[in-house]
Image (tube, coloured by chain):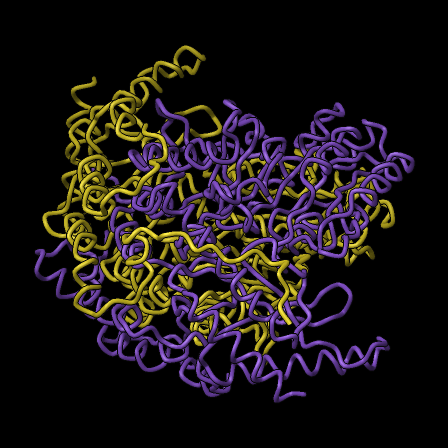
Chain colours: A yellow, B purple
Amino acid sequence: MIHDDVTEPSYPELPPALRAAFEALPEDEVRARMEGFVALALQRLRAPAGSPVPPPIPARLIARAFEAPLPEQGQPIEAILADVAEHVMPHGRDKRSPTWFAQLDVPPTDYSVFSGLLIRALAQDPITFSSARSGTFVERQVLGWLTSLAFPDVPQAGGCFTSGGTQSNFQALLILRNEALRRAGADVNALGLVEALSRTGHRGMRVFASEASHPSIFAAVRQLGLGDAGLHRVPTDGQDRLCPIALEAALVEARRQGQLPAVVVLTAGSSGVGAVDPLREGMRLAHQHGALVHVDAAHGSLLLFSQRHRGLLDGLQGADTVTLDPHKVLGLNAQLGGLLVRDARLLTLLGKVSLDYFVTSEVSDLGEVTLDGSRALNSLGAWLLLRHFGRDGYGRLVDHLFALARDFTRRLKKSGCFELFPDTPTMNMLAFRLRPKAASETPEELARENARNDALLSRLMQSRKFAVSCYRHASGHLYLRAVFINPASRPEHMAALADALIQLAREAE
Amino acid sequence: MIHDDVTEPSYPELPPALRAAFEALPEDEVRARMEGFVALALQRLRAPAGSPVPPPIPARLIARAFEAPLPEQGQPIEAILADVAEHVMPHGRDKRSPTWFAQLDVPPTDYSVFSGLLIRALAQDPITFSSARSGTFVERQVLGWLTSLAFPDVPQAGGCFTSGGTQSNFQALLILRNEALRRAGADVNALGLVEALSRTGHRGMRVFASEASHPSIFAAVRQLGLGDAGLHRVPTDGQDRLCPIALEAALVEARRQGQLPAVVVLTAGSSGVGAVDPLREGMRLAHQHGALVHVDAAHGSLLLFSQRHRGLLDGLQGADTVTLDPHKVLGLNAQLGGLLVRDARLLTLLGKVSLDYFVTSEVSDLGEVTLDGSRALNSLGAWLLLRHFGRDGYGRLVDHLFALARDFTRRLKKSGCFELFPDTPTMNMLAFRLRPKAASETPEELARENARNDALLSRLMQSRKFAVSCYRHASGHLYLRAVFINPASRPEHMAALADALIQLAREAE
């Protein structure tokens, strides 16, 4: 019984390069194919460390190498790797340089780089138990470790991994939007926002977050359908910390206007200067007015490892959701954000709909509680590093970074050339600007002061010895910003950075 | 002038392992440290290919190795890698086996695995030009290539990378929710959904998607605040394709109910059986009723490379947004989803709020149009593979996969043992079940038939020679599902799979 309604299969000729790339080859051949990649990686990883500042080549010149259309025929891998060496790598900067002070992430360890190879070779996708198998337990174990640090006394706490802090903040506010409406009596996943709010008798719902919150918070409120109108930007005190009196007034006002006070967002380690909002007071006010609490500790979560400094996070356990960022904190450089929740059941409010075509199994699938679908098992890198350094090692790493910040701060203060913000660093970072020349602060004066600091930043970067960044405060002041984030940075690097800045400041007088 | 209000820095002693992991070492030492990781990766990559089915070890036994609390002190890297070898790797399965037919993603090439090392070593984060530098142009070039395939005649088309198809679908519907309201006269990013809908005079807004859409579409509608009430699940025809007559009726009904017909979602390559919705007819109806169009081509986008088969996507250029999935299609196995838009300006409707502390530069930052913040430059792997295989190589790859599906289908048909769904495969996959014994279809009969197929799947998997998956159709029928996704699969593998199934089917008579 032959059916002829299916076309005779017509196999095309496959190019040898394509065949070879998908075949399993003998070990020595695989190793030989890997060597070109290893050699390029070593160029970046080996001593001496490269410059933390990329060479000042204009963008349009860099862009020239990347303008060809998609080639019709394949090119040899050697030629492509030669292009990586010639046109990609020379324009990077070395985040692992001990004088790289520009961003919040601990630079990647060698082991994080190597684990990138292993994670892709294993290809254990955490979305389901059937595709991840042992990877499911790797991921759960790391989540358990992080949960035990953030919620040590909360047995029902849990969490999930995300693509980064931005996604964690979005997912947290999504869950809390849904939970706030659930508590008010409406299922927003079924009804939608318009009908859910109407049923609970509210004119709208509101999220409260300080002006110094990470922009991903403001974006998430928009994406969730609440709009800027659904966000109350709470003023900060003189050190970028949320002002509790202003929060209380905002909560009272929202109720008076018939708004559901849904979520108070507190920041532990602001991206600007590492400010930590008053967690206990913020939570007390939120609870008093029936609001849920999200703590964005993407940066501040590194404090959890330090016995010396974790007191700064006192009260964290009262949060409903916490963003933390393993890829910022642990010396991974790849996509691994974290979201922890005080009650693991909250994670199911995500609105996920199951995939029928996955075989269900004896273990619940991690994909049920993540925004992402298929993912890489990036948590394997965190699992490896947390075991290799231990809680104590990361604690010392944090203490070292804090000591660097204090060391640098003392040097700048001693010079008298700079105004610091805040006057004493809260965490491992400091903002500073040239001591203003004028006592008044007209818009013209402000612009002139900002231009002086902008010029200082440019001159420092031109040396290509140090990378720092800048921070524009809500007041309009432009600060330079140094983040002490590399355990390879030493007191001598603090001295060198401070000396360079002080010399440039004196030249700028 | 010494200020004593800053604590004297107190540097902790850093463990040698921690110091060593962040220092740049001489090349031979870095290479030596890498070797343990390389050896494990080679175990997975070298010939012979491993089993496509993991060993049948109960989950609770696997879990035992992952129960220790976070260690206080660090452990040697050798001990940790030994645990990877003993407790992680043996439980995986080889997605690169030529008899792995379980999922939609082209298995990772060696070069994708190796590029995982390179991407992490370079650490060029695409979020800003200043952190990505040349990486910005790598990413733009790949986006340009993909855009030229999907929108060859649309100069203003553009796109961005995401963490995967699920995020692409969410971002597409987010953008289109906002655009639909913008066209109706309201800025939802400012006002929020409740007020925006009220201003446009609509009682709600509606998304239309077929019952065979990927679950991420249904989840996105909930997450965006529209609720299940804001989703019209359009019935499908006998082959899992959206039924245009039902769509038209749904659009008319929505208007009649005072709903804004916002977005019609069409699927090109359903995750169940690779069904392609009638794109031109769906778009015509959407436009006639003022709705925008999203095409989920996460799977179907591989057709774009094939001159033989790309006609199946005729009309795609009329879409406002298109999900495609480089990590499904290109033989990458890591997080790289894509979202293409017919008008690049649509990408700015995301609701992103800029980070003031990034130095702005001469080139716009890719982070302005992505949901993610910091990311890995995973597009470098796609850049490398697209150049290595060329458009023609990927086209032949697709043609090969389609030929495999037709080859397998003919063999199953010839046996007369199976009922196929659909009767002829649309793409590179096929669903099938044992020919039902009963002519009637009572619930009891259905359950009995499903149990027979479930048992068939179990017996096939027990051999550990072939991995297939299953698909539960909306009718309740349980099908086995084979996806032909590996260019290393050959006609002899089709024969082997078909023979094994036919033998099991005859034993099950």
x then y, percent, for residue A122: 36, 68
* Up-down relation of residue A401 to residue A361 (above or below): above
User: Which residue is at a point 38% across and 42% down the rendered structure image?
Assistant: B392
Q: Is residue B295 left or right of residue B241?
A: left
Q: Is residue A11 visible?
A: yes
Give the tally of numbered discs.
0
Q: Is residue A445 above or below residue A294?
A: above
**Spot occupied by residue A237 in the image (x, y as percentages of width and height):** 51, 37
A456 relative position to A492: left or right: right
| Quadrant of the image occupied by residue B413 | bottom right
Which of the pair A385/A229 is nearer the observer?
A385
Q: Residue at x 37, y 25 (%)?
A: B363
Res. B1 in view: no
Work out whether residue B372 or residue B508 is closer to the camera in this orientation and state it.
B508
Among the 4 quarters of the image, the one containing residue B138: top left
| Residue B182 locus on image (x, y percent) | 70, 26
Up/down of B126 relative to B106, above or below: above
